[in-house]
Image (cartoon, grey):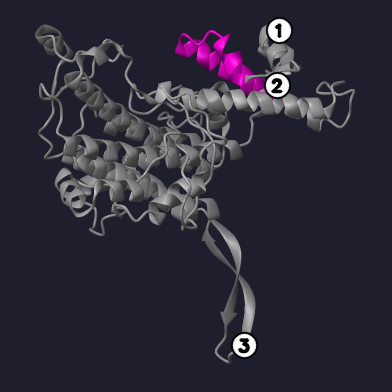
Amino acid sequence: MAVPWTPAASVPSNEDMEMMKEKFAKLLLGEDMSGGGKGVSSALALSNAITNLGASAFAEQKRLEPMAPEMKARWRKEVDWLLSVTDHIVEFVPSKQRSTDGSTMDVMITRQRADLHMNIPALRKLDAMLIECLDNFKDVNEFSYISKDEAAHEGGNNRNDDKWWIPTPQVPSDGLSDVTRKWLQFQKDSVNQVLKAAMAINAQVLAEMEIPENYVENLPKNGRASLGDFIYKSITDDFFDPDYFLSNIDLSSEHKIVDLKNKIEASIIIWRRKMSAKDSKSSWGSAVSIGKRELFEERAETILLILKQRFPGLPQSQLDGSKIQFNRDVGQAILESYSRTIETMAFTVLSRIDDVIQADAIARDPSTAAIKRFSLKQNSTVSEQFPNAREEVEKWNASEVPSSMTLSDFMGWAMDQSEAEVKKDYEFPKDGNFKASKPPPFIVTNKRMSYLENLGVSRSPTARH
C-alpha cells in the first residue's frame, strides 16, 4: 500500500534556498518581474506555479517507466514548497482550555482551514500512489518501446492516431503472459481510482468557486440565445432523450464538443439567475415557470454529465477557465491546480497502459487492429451521478487489496489466491461505479473533469488583470 510522502526533514542546501527565494519572489510579485504591481493575484500565481511545475515534471512521461530520479526529487521538493502555503491558511474553531485549578473555559484557537485539512493529505496520497505505480514498471521486460518511424518501417503495432510523438509499445509476437496481462489490468484499475478521486476533488473545488461577474455580464439574457434554436428546442421539448439528442449533434471534433459544453454551462447559469430573480422586471426575469426552468436545468446538467464521462480529455470550459483566472481564494487555487495536475497525470498513465493493452490485443489477434482501441474518451456508459470525492478517495482506505504492487508481488499474491478469490476481493464494475464496503475514513469534495494530456497538464489562465 502506498504511503504518502512527507517533506524531508533535512536542512535545505544553499542551492535549494536560492531556488526557493526565487520561486516565492515570483509569487509575491504576481509574475510581474518589473515590480510595477501589475502582476496577477496570489491565487492565480500559485495556480500557475503548480500547473507549470506539473507540466515540466510529467509532460515527458511517454513510457511506462519510473520517473527520472532528479525529476521525481524536484517534483516532491518544489510541490512541497508551494503546498506549504496552506499550513498558514487557518480558521478559528472553538476549544476547551483547562486551567491549573481544574476549571475549563471555552476559547477560540486557530486550525488549518477544513477543506485544506481534509484534501491536501488526500491529494498527497494520490500523488504518491501514482509515482509508486510508475516505479512498479521498473523491472517489467515483457514489452518495450520503439519510435513511430521504427514501428512503421517494421510493420509493427503502429497506432494510426494523432499521438505521433509517443513511442509505440512492442510486445512478444504471441502477446503478454497471462500474469503480466492481469497485473497490467490491476495497475490500470488502481490508477483509474486515483483519477476518479482527483477529478472529484477538482470538480468540487471548481463548483465552490464564485462565478466571476465578468463571465455573467457577457452571457446572453436567455437560454435560447445561448444554445441556438435547435439545441434549445431539443432540451425544452416534451420528450427528451439525452442519448438521442447527442446522436444528432456534431461531436466530430474537440472544438465542437467544447463549444457545446460552453453553451450548456452558460444556459444553466442563465436559468439559475432567472429562477433566483425576485423582480420579474429584472433583466434576468422570465415568464417561464420555475418548475419548467428546473426541468430544463436538470436536462442540461444530464447532457454535461454525459459529455464529461465520454470525453474526459477535454480542455477547460470558458466557465472553469474564468473561475480559475478571477478566483481570489488561495486555498481553492492550490487545491484546484494540484488536483488537476494529479488528474492529468493519472489520465496520461492510463493512456500509456491502454497503449500496451492494445498492442497485446493486436499481437494475440491481428484482426483487432482494425477495431478502435479502448479509451476513456470512448466510454459512453453514463452512471447515475458523477463520482463523489469523499467516497472515491476513501475507498482506498476501505480496500483490503494493495492499491499498487510490482509484477513479482502480484505473481506471489496471485499464487496465494485463486482467480475467484482475486475477482471477489478486487472487482471493478464495468460501469465504473463503486460501492464502498465500509464507511470511508477521510474526505474531499465532488464533481468535474477537464483538459488535455498533450502537455502533461493543462495551462491555467495567465491573463493579467
Q: Earlier in the sequence, mark 1 or mark 2?
A: 2
Q: Earlier in the sequence, mark 2 or mark 3?
A: 3
Q: Is residue 459 left or right of residue 105?
A: left
What residue does disc 2 label?
217
Depth check: give the residue in front, 325 or 339: 339
Find the magenta span and give its range.
242-270
> What separation in Å lies between label 1 and label 3 (alpha carbons)?
71 Å
Give the number of the mark in front: 1 or 3: 1
Q: What residue do we see at 64% from left, 29% from top? A: 212
Is 396 in front, or is 257?
A: 396
> Image height check: is 289 above or below 339?
above
At label 2, the amino acid type is Glu
What residue is drawn where x is 53% and y is 45%? 445
Disc number placed over residue 103 in the picture, else none: 3
Image quadrant where one finds the N terminus: bottom left
Q: Residue furthest bottom?
A: 101
Secondary element at image label 2: helix
Is residue 255 found inside the magenta-colored segment of the image?
yes
In the image, what residue type sits under mark 3?
Ser
Q: Give yes or no for residue 9 being in the magenta stretch.
A: no
Disc 3 element: loop
Q: Quadrant of residue 208?
A: top right
Badge 1 element? helix
Residue 461 in sight = no
Of circles 1 and 2, which is in front? 1
In the rendered structure, are the residues bearing label 2 and label 3 in contact, judged by CB atoms less than 8 Å apart?
no
Gap in Å between the C-alphas at discs 2 and 3?
57 Å
Label 1 is placed on what type of residue?
A: Asp
> Mark 1 and mark 2: span between their CA atoms?
22 Å
Q: Position of residue 390 (x, y in %)?
A: 50, 49
**Residue 330: horizontal and vertical position, in percent?**
51, 43
Q: Label 1, on which residue? A: 229
